[in-house]
Image: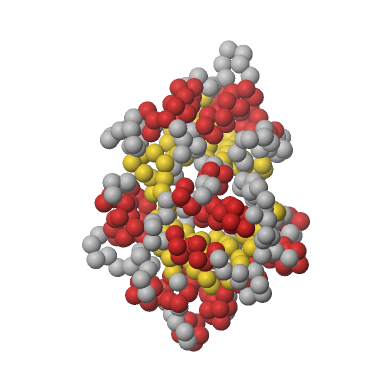
């Protein structure tokens, strides 16, 4: 994703970013944000400590320290970020969050502040991934996985769920699906989204953000959206029973609904949706597929143990691994679907041909794309040992 020269330049400039000798804090903050974008960091942490304002960022899913600015600057730096995000600068005793104002072409950024022992901590989230994967080729899905996803996207009704833990690229994948569908149908289908927040602009697609303080929630918004004659709806995330039920009901009435859901495995996503209150008959008739996924770091192409272009990590860029649960794997009996535990469902899915995440990881290791250490970091030791039981 990030080019070698871009990362290199960002790194060189970091040591010189601290405002000193009359340099203005707004300029330094602007350069820090620019450096984070250039390096394709997903999060930038500014933590006030006894030593100073410690800076770190998350690259390819891993947090690393990038420097310390003088402690006396910390309040001004955080205050500058709060100004950019239209937050209350005089309130330093409450957590706050807001969207950073930005120039055209910059990635979407959101600031969250939190009072700590040494002052307010600031975390800037940069939505780099959602803006950068334009096609399925960019995602790097396995050759036998992609046709399953494409086929599900050809459906005109039903629900397609992207599952995984936080930071597993669920929204990025959903965005890529919408971009591909927009290309394919070129205005012949109405594609709409309901998100919290809108992470990147999708040309040709009607995007809306929920507004919880105004009680414009996912379920309320989705019910209204249905009257806007959409063909395909992306609902940012299923978080509660009401949204889950509305998503599945919408999927039965002539719409294809895409959504994301927090779950460790595809089988667990099914049982968690059920336990959230989605009726087995809705699951049975609405579900078109569940893709459960993780992001794994790829080996740096320029080195074997670490170089400047990979920030001495040995990794650069990430690849998606995924398992795909076909709705045919679900028990036909609704009584059985009502009570089946995740591990029994996993066994059924594997018998029906699902490849588990650990198998995908092993394929990538065998191809030399990633390492065993990275697979263990992402999936845990247990999943990678021979004859391991299915991931929950
Ligand atoms: Zn390297």
Does any portion of residue 347 appear in the rendered image? no
Quarter of the view holding residue 328: bottom left
Q: Position of residue 171 (x, y in %)?
A: 55, 54
Total number of numbered discs in the rendering: 0
Residue in the picture at 40% in, 75% down = 345
Q: Residue at x 63, y 75 (%)?
A: 252
Q: Quadrant of residue 326?
A: bottom left
- In the displayed structure, does residue 327 sit left or right of residue 114? left
In this view of the protein, can residue 318 be seen by the observer?
A: yes
Residue 187 at what x, y percent from top left?
68, 56
Task: Tell me if residue 232 comes above or below residue 250 in the rendering.
Answer: above
Viewer-nearest residue: 114 or 147: 147
Give the quadrant of the C terminus. bottom left
Looking at the picture, how far across and down is residue 139, in whole percent? 46, 50
- Given residues 261 and 118, the one toward you in this image is 261
Lateral position of residue 114 relative to residue 215, left or right? left
Farthest residue toward the top? 21
Q: How is this picture coloured?
A: secondary structure
Residue ID at (53%, 43%):
132
Q: Residue at x 47, y 57 (%)?
A: 165
Vertical order, 331 against 302 (above or below): below
Q: Position of residue 224 (x, y in %)?
A: 75, 65
């Amino acid at each position: 994703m990030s080019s070698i020269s871009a990362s290199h330049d960002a790194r060189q400039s970091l040591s010189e970013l601290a405002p000193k000798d009359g340099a203005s804090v707004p300029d330094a903050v602007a350069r820090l944000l620019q450096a984070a974008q250039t390096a394709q960091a997903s999060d930038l942490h500014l933590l006030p400590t006894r030593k100073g304002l410690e800076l770190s960022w998350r690259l390819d899913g891993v947090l690393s320290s990038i420097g310390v600015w003088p402690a006396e600057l910390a309040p001004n730096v955080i205050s500058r970020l709060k100004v950019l995000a239209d937050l209350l600068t005089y309130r330093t005793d409450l957590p706050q969050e807001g969207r950073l104002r930005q120039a055209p072409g910059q990635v979407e950024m959101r600031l969250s502040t939190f009072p700590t022992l040494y002052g307010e901590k600031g975390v800037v989230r940069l939505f780099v991934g959602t803006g950068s994967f334009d096609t399925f080729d960019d995602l790097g899905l396995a050759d036998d996985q992609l046709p399953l996803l494409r086929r599900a996207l050809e459906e005109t009704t039903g629900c397609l769920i992207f599952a995984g833990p936080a930071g597993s690229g669920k929204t990025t994948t959903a965005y890529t699906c919408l971009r591909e569908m927009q290309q394919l149908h070129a205005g012949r289908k109405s594609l709409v989204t309901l998100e919290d927040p809108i992470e990147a602009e999708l040309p040709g697609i009607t995007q809306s953000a929920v507004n919880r303080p105004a009680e414009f929630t996912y379920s309320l918004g989705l019910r209204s959206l249905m009257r806007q004659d959409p063909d395909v709806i992306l609902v940012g995330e299923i978080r509660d029973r009401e949204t889950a039920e509305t998503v599945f009901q919408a999927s039965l009435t002539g719409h294809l609904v895409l959504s994301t859901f927090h779950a460790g495995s595809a089988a667990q996503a099914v049982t968690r949706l059920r336990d959230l209150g989605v009726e087995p008959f809705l699951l049975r008739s609405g579900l078109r597929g569940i893709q459960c996924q993780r992001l794994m770091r790829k080996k740096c192409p320029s080195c074997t143990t670490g170089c400047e272009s990979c920030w001495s990590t040995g990794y650069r860029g990430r690849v998606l691994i995924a398992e795909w649960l076909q709705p045919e794997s679900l028990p036909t009996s609704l009584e059985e679907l009502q009570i089946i535990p995740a591990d029994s469902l996993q066994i059924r899915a594997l018998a029906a041909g699902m490849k588990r995440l650990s198998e995908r990881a092993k394929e990538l290791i065998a191809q030399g794309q990633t390492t065993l250490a990275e697979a263990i970091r992402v999936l845990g030791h247990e999943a990678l040992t021979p004859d391991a039981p299915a991931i929950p």
